[in-house]
Image (tube, grey):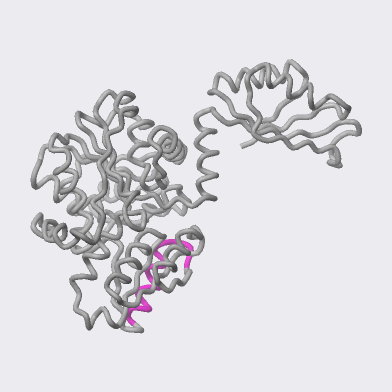
Amino acid sequence: MLTPRQIEFAAENLKGTIRRTELIHSPYFSEHLGAPLYFKCENLQYTGSFKVRGAYHFLSQQSPQRLAAGVITASAGNHAQGLASAAALLDCPCRVVMPVGTPLAKELATIEYGAEVELYGNSFDEAVDRARQLAESEELLYVPAFDDELIMAGQGSIGLEILADLPELQTLIVPIGGGGLIAGIATAVKAEKPAVRIIGVEAACIASAQLARRNGGPVMVASRCHSLADGIAVKQVGELTFPIIEALVDEIISVEEEAIAMAIVSLMEKSKLVVEGAGAVGLAALLYGMKPIHQGHTVCLLSGGNLDVQTMSRVVERGMLAEGRYLKLRLEMIDMPGALAKLTGVLSQIGANIFQVNHDRHKSSWPLGEAEVILELETRGPGHIQKILLVLEEEGYRPEVLR
């Protein structure tokens, strides 16, 4: 199994090349949770994710001859960017197979780092099969996303940084996908401070680590859901990472999509940090989980920040909707001068801020003399939403909530 010495060697190897990311105390969330909370900001890492640590360490331990032939991997985004960046630093050709549907921003970022990108398959696992076939047929070096000791050692350097910055650490919350990140960090932290509680968090719709723990080994998840936490939406944890997770990770929990969305919005609003879904699952578990999971000085690892603008817009809307701060309505009203002004006046009186209004009098399915109005409103919570709906009903508008 992975050893602390391997991680210490990786940490020395990464010095001067990989950013030593900040550990930031959060006064707001500390007060909210009743315990000191810190964020380890790998979202501020070069390439926007922790993945560059493992990728660079892996490549740097290969012979120049092996690198000269080129490297290849499969990735939904962050490992791709990390490997492309590391390959550029070491001047070796890089190819990446990405699943169809990978956010365009991640694809373009990978290309900008110098990699050649091929889109293939509808899942990470299908992309992996394709990349391994190309590696064999074209004699390229395949770089695993997580299931390799060099990769895990590079990621484990994060744990050493956390301990150096916060010796009082008592709880560490880490996202789980394939398990390379948490396996490396757990190995580093438990070797120095065995009493630290390490908690893994994954998306509920593709909880492969929990399934593996229940079954005593890695098992393929049947779910084909699309998660906001696409960076950890891995159907099966690694054969090498699983024994480490079993031995060193105290608890594995899952979070729903609404919680992930709300955590992303909270990080933007309260901490001014842009964090992708996979990076926000830890805070989602802290804020919206079924039970308290933190004890004492707690660190929440923000593993990545590669959130494209289109996804950000959808996530913010979804997060606000889940918190009762956004309401989309369809209603009907009389098509006559002043009718729209009357409606907006009613909304103003009950404190509903209009984001957008669409007034359509030409829809063929509506009776003559009536119009359809689609409203997007900023609201102050579930109670305010109920008040808006009640007042509109009393005014005769028959509102229909749109999701």
Figure check: 355 above or below 241: above
Horizontal relation, residue 57 to residue 370: left or right? left
- Which residue is at a point 53% across and 27% down the rendered structure image? 324
Q: Is 88 covered by the magenta stretch?
A: no
Looking at the rendering, in which quadrant would you find the N terminus?
Answer: bottom left
Figure check: 76 above or below 262: below
Q: Which residues are magenta?
A: 121-136
- Which residue is at a point 32% across and 71% down the rendered structure image? 88
Figure check: 67 above or below 345: below
Horizontal relation, residue 91 to residue 352: left or right? left
Which residue is more in the foreground, 176 or 165?
165
- Which residue is at a point 46% across and 39% down the rendered structure image? 261
* Residue furthest front in the image: 16
- Give how far across and how far down residue 56 sits, in percent: 25, 65
Looking at the rendering, in which quadrant would you find the C terminus?
Answer: top right
- Give how far across and how far down residue 190 sits, in percent: 12, 45
Residue 168 position by quadrant: top left
- Give how far across and how far down residue 162 sits, in percent: 19, 44
Residue 264 position by quadrant: top left
- For the image shown, how many numbered marks are present on the structure? 0
Q: Is 135 covered by the magenta stretch?
A: yes
- Give how far across and how far down residue 24 sits, in percent: 27, 38
Figure check: 139 above or below 238: below
Provide the major secondary structure of the magenta segment. Answer: helix
